[in-house]
Image (spheres, helix red, strand yellow):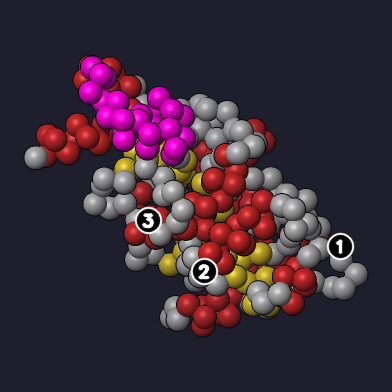
Amino acid sequence: MAKFCSESRKLLIFLAVKYNGDFGKILTALQLKEDIDTPYEVVEEVYNNLKCKTLTFLDYDYPEKLKKIYRPPLVLFYYGDVTLLSDKQKTFAVVGSRHYNDYGKAVTEKIISEMPKDTILISGMAKGIDTLAHEAAIKHKIRTIAVLGSGIDFCYPSENKHLYEKIKKDYLLISEYPNALEPSPSYFPERNRIVVGLSNAVVVPQINSFQSGTMISINLALSIDKPIFVVPTSIFDETVNNDLINEGATPLKNAAQILENLKWK
């Protein structure tokens, strides 16, 4: 049985590499029993050539949180401390605009600096608020998970190479896309569902448009009943933070509100 499970696991990883992490194609290949025509040596070679580690839907430590999202990733490629994905961890996501102002930067730093050291920040390592959030977490000794919208071995954006290497070494870097696969516009919304799925709550320091990736994350959080906290802004600021609050998001003034809402001591 153990050998069967090991071979099934390697096959799933092989398909994830072959189809570049595309959930639909991997699922179709499994349904059509594509493995029947795949030599075991080929599967083994692809598996052994991976630089990173893997976590699959078949593994006992695959997080239950992810099983509740739409199309949970069948394979996660990762570097770092995979125990950060444990369902027992206290996690919060920070998402926001790629273009931020001084206020957005200041409140991102403030909220993260107030969070307890046993919490984990999750974000997408994108330009803007995502990058600020990861950097603030590291600065204030809060563990962090970066979910990539590219292959696990492809740093995007390139200017975040230092951040990529730091998280890879000391925290957790994950992606459902293998190797050095370059990012595609469709990958980022897919990435967002993992960020939201792994978190207990979603924090929005600054969002500038209803037509943004941040709104995708917010809608995903609403679909699985995750609490959403939005920082209020001045009526003179060109953001949509206050509009989201008017529509029902919780206005966020400090980290204590998050702790109280989630009943974290």
- According to the picture, the residue beneath numbered tag 2 turns out to be 226
Residue 22 highlighted magenta (yes or no): yes
In the rendered view, tell whether residue 50 sits above or below residue 111.
Answer: above
Assess disc 2: are there few (<14), some (14-19) or many (≥20) residues with their C-alpha within 10 Å of its C-alpha: some
Q: Which mark sits nearer the N-terminus, 1 or 3?
A: 3
Q: Position of residue 210 (x, y in %)?
A: 75, 58
Q: Which mark sits nearer the N-terminus, 3 or 2?
A: 3
Q: Quadrant of the N terminus?
A: top left
Name which quarter of the figure residue 51 lies in.
top left
Q: Amino acid at mark 3?
A: Lys
Residue drawn at (71%, 75%) of the image: 247
Residue 70 marker: none
Segment tinted magenta in the rendering: 15-39
Instruction: Characterize the magenta stretch by its predominant secondary structure.
Output: helix
Q: Is residue 99 found left or right of 163 in the rendered image?
A: right
Q: Amino acid at mark 1?
A: Glu
- According to the picture, the residue beneath numbered tag 3 turns out to be 67
Assess disc 3: are there few (<14), some (14-19) or many (≥20) residues with their C-alpha within 10 Å of its C-alpha: some
